[in-house]
Amino acid sequence: MAKVATGPEIKRAEQMIKVLFFAAIREQLDCAELELKLNAEANTISDVKASLSKKGADWQKVFTDPTVLVAVNQTMVDDAQSLKNNDTLAFFPPVTGG
Amino acid sequence: MSLNSIKVQQQDFDFAKEVDTLEDNNLVDGATVTFVGRVRNNNDGCQVKHLFLEHYAGMTEKCLFDITQQARERWQLGNISVIHRFGQLSLGEKIVFVGITSKHRQDAFMAAEFIMDYLKVSAPFWKKELTEQGERWVAAKAKDTQEANKW
């Protein structure tokens, strides 16, 4: 039987964010992008970093490095920033263009 | 209406054409200042063979546009054009172009330096160089942060 979505069920729908990695960080992690479920109680960039750090030694090294920069929806932000459904997060090393 | 052109592209650009674009039909500005950054054959004591530039498409354009708008808030500027290339670049190739016109020279001189200093620390580009010792990501320089902080 087809399941009919109800109000409370829609509210419980998973909140997802996209996470991108660039340059040396992408190579260190061997990962260009991933999707992450957003935890309603722990939704800041610091929380995401803490969670990604648990994925392995390389990940822990990257996400405990204080020089790593982060952008949300293509704007640089700091670690206290909260995230919302469908945000695109990007982690990258200090920039070296020009 | 002033020109405010931002281009992030793989292909090379023609310096003379870019200057013409800034100056054509522009009789109000007496000053044109340009900067071109090129791939040099040495960095940190190593011979460089070529450069590879990675960028965050979308954010680079947005970031360069924001920097030009900040420059316009600080100085009286006419036309602005910024071009930044990405991909593989050989020795001597052009990487970046900043061109600005203004009524008097001081505004364009200052704005060109400001745009380059800010681009260096905030636009999401990363250089990887191939040297005789192998490939390496170019490390960010503390000096570039100091240059940007002076504004």
Image (cartoon, rainbow, N blue to C red):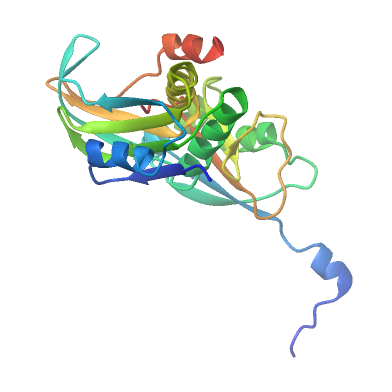
Does residue B86 appear in this view? no
Looking at the image, which residue sits at the far bottom? A1
Name the foreground residue: B2 vs B118. B2
Residue at 60% across, 23% down: B74
Count the numbered circles shown: 0
Residue at 82% across, 69% down: A9
* Left or right of residue A35, residue B38 in this image: left
Looking at the image, which residue sits at the far right? A8
Name the foreground residue: B27 vs A61. B27
Give how far across and how far down residue A52 sits, in percent: 57, 37
Q: Quadrant of the C terminus of chain B?
A: top right
Looking at the image, which residue sits at the far front? B27
Residue at 48% across, 36% down: B64
Name the foreground residue: B148 vs B52. B148
* Left or right of residue B25, residue A60 in this image: right
Q: Is residue B130 placed above or below A73 in the rendered structure?
A: above
Does residue B94 appear in this view? yes
Q: Is residue B136 placed above or below A4 in the rendered structure?
A: above
Give how far across and how far down residue B98 sits, in percent: 37, 30
Give how far across and how far down residue B5 sits, in percent: 44, 43
Residue at 80% across, 62% down: A12
Kindly indicate the quadrant of the structure image that contains residue B150: top right
Give how far across and how far down residue B100 sits, in percent: 42, 30
